[in-house]
Amino acid sequence: MKTKRIFVQSAAGPYPVVCGAGVLRHAAREIGKLGKFSNVHVVSSAKVWRAIGRRVRRGVGIENRGAVHLMNDREAAKNLRTVEWLARGLVKGGADRKSLLIAVGGGVVGDVAGFVAASYLRGVALVHVPTTVVAQVDSSIGGKTGVNLPEGKNLIGAFYPPRLVLSDPEVLRTLPEREFRGGLAEIIKHAVIADAEMFAYLEKNMERVERRDREALDYLIPRNVAIKARVVTRDERESGLREILNFGHTFAHALESVTHYKRYQHGEAVAWGMMAAALLGHETGVTRADAVSRIVSLVRRMGPLPAWPRVPVRALLAAMRTDKKTRDGKLRFVLTPRIGKAASYDGVPLAAVERVLRFAPHFFCDSGHVHA
């Protein structure tokens, strides 16, 4: 496909998301447009680096092997210990204020490397090279960085926009099947909240998408980038509109937290969360039954999910109360009045949330499960 350049506006100035098959081969040229840097450091994971490290080295032009820092990219390692380990590695590697940090990987690598870039020497330049579906269509765009605490997800972080995002659909071909399928949740989310036409496309073409059909990915990746760019440009710091990007995430973050970030990949938790949010929308009179049915049906076509955890409802509610959208101890949810539109809702009755939490594992129990 032709390269597409989508600009995101931020308080630090606009930055481009460059999308297209083979973009990574021209990384050095794109990075060169940013100016000169004293040195370049890459943050990635061992499995990602094995798959595409040689390609990144050629594309970026890195010679010094000590400039590559490989972290654990499991959600359970997304914490302050990893931040300290990376920061100390940068010190040992001679990184200074004129250094460039390139995050090569999925959402965990991007979130952690982004937070390190925001805080190391009070800020060094950052470039994202997202290698998963979730990262390409969502987490690498918008400048949200952060790590988890035992009490909840992404409670420590900063808004820190990158200078550049290089999104190459070719690297998705190296993804394990489970990771690719899980990432489709964020694409479905964007369709639910902002693009009814794309939702209909997914209903018609899900099998092609799951086969990683090039034409389908060429259609979906830039379209999703444009949705995320449009939302975060209008609300960079999540003061209003940007909250709609959290459709399903209040449930998802609770599921991840109560299972200690070890059962679900993020997209899998979001998949459960979207089905639960659709059901909650129906319980509160916001979402019509036909929309609930379409959302649940499409999410289930992603494939089997790890089972809903056997934990008390009160444990899930406690985890939900650490959600960043909570105000004065009251839960707030993103719900969809119709496919293609979403908004945040205050005053959702606790009894309705409890009904969903009790009913969800039974309602979706025949959707198939995998064991993590």
Image (cartoon, helix red, strand yellow):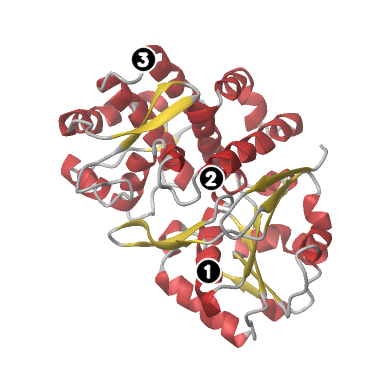
| Numbered tag placed on residue 288 in the rendering | 3
**In the displayed structure, does residue 264 sit left or right of residue 314?**
right
Q: Is residue 370 visible?
A: no
Q: Residues within 10 Å of mark 2 (few under 14, many from 20)?
A: many
For marks 3 and 1, the one nearer the N-term is 1
Could you tell me the amino acid type at mark 1?
Ala
For marks 1 and 2, the one nearer the N-term is 1
Q: Secondary structure at mark 3?
A: loop
| Numbered tag placed on residue 353 in the rendering | none
- The location of residue 178, given as percent across then percent down, is 54, 42
Nearer mark to the viewer, of 1 and 2: 2
Q: Which residue is mark 2?
A: 232
- Distance CA(mark 1)–CA(mark 2): 18 Å
| Numbered tag placed on residue 118 in the rendering | 1
**In the displayed structure, does residue 277 sit left or right of residue 23?**
left
Nearer mark to the viewer, of 3 and 2: 2
